[in-house]
Amino acid sequence: MAKKCEICGKGPQVGNAVSHAHNLTKRRWMPNIRKLRILVKGSPKSAYVCTRCLRAGKVVKAL
């Protein structure tokens, strides 16, 4: 599955997982991506879209 939103470009974030003893290990936060059929210029297209774009109304679902 794609890990990038085709609408806003949101992708994985990187950082550290911090233990109780303050040991640092690298980790990734993945965006909540869904594969949808959306309308682009009036025609349906399959795209990977983050749920934040869906809730904000930036995307129109194709029926």
Image (cartoon, rainbow, N blue to C red):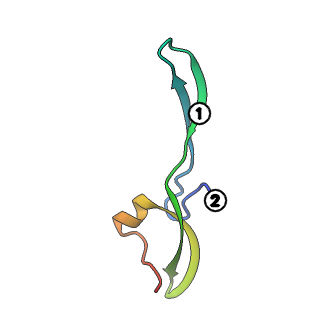
Q: Nearer the viewer, residue 57 or 34?
A: 34
**Amino acid type assigned to the residue bearing label 1 in the image:** Arg
| Crowd band around label 1 with a 10 angstrom C-alpha radius: few (<14), some (14–19), many (20+) | few
Residue 6 place in picture, x, y as percent: 56, 64
Q: Residue at x 52, y 59 (%)?
A: 33
Residue 50 place in picture, x, y as percent: 48, 60
Tell me the quarter of the image containing the N terminus.
bottom right
Q: Residue furthest left?
A: 56
Q: Residue furthest front?
A: 20
In the picture of the structure, the residue carrying the numbered disc 2 is 2
In the picture of the structure, the residue carrying the numbered disc 1 is 27
Among the 4 quarters of the image, the one containing residue 27 = top right
| Crowd band around label 2 with a 10 angstrom C-alpha radius: few (<14), some (14–19), many (20+) | few
Q: Are marks 1 and 2 in contact (CB under 8 Å)?
A: no
Count the marks: 2
Q: Nearer the viewer, residue 32 or 53?
A: 32
Q: Earlier in the sequence, mark 1 or mark 2?
A: 2
Q: Residue at x 57, y 71 (%)?
A: 47
**Amino acid type assigned to the residue bearing label 2 in the image:** Ala
Instruction: Please determine whether, in this image, residue 20 is positioned above or below residue 51.
Output: above
Q: Tell me if 47 is positioned left or right of 39 in this view.
A: right
Q: CA distance from mark 1 to mark 2?
A: 18 Å
Q: Secondary structure at mark 1?
A: strand
Residue 46 place in picture, x, y as percent: 59, 76
Q: Secondary structure at mark 2?
A: loop
Q: Residue at x 36, y 64 (%)?
A: 55
Q: Residue furthest right?
A: 1
Instruction: Please determine whether, in this image, residue 38 is positioned above or below residue 16.
Output: below
Label drawn at residue 38 = none
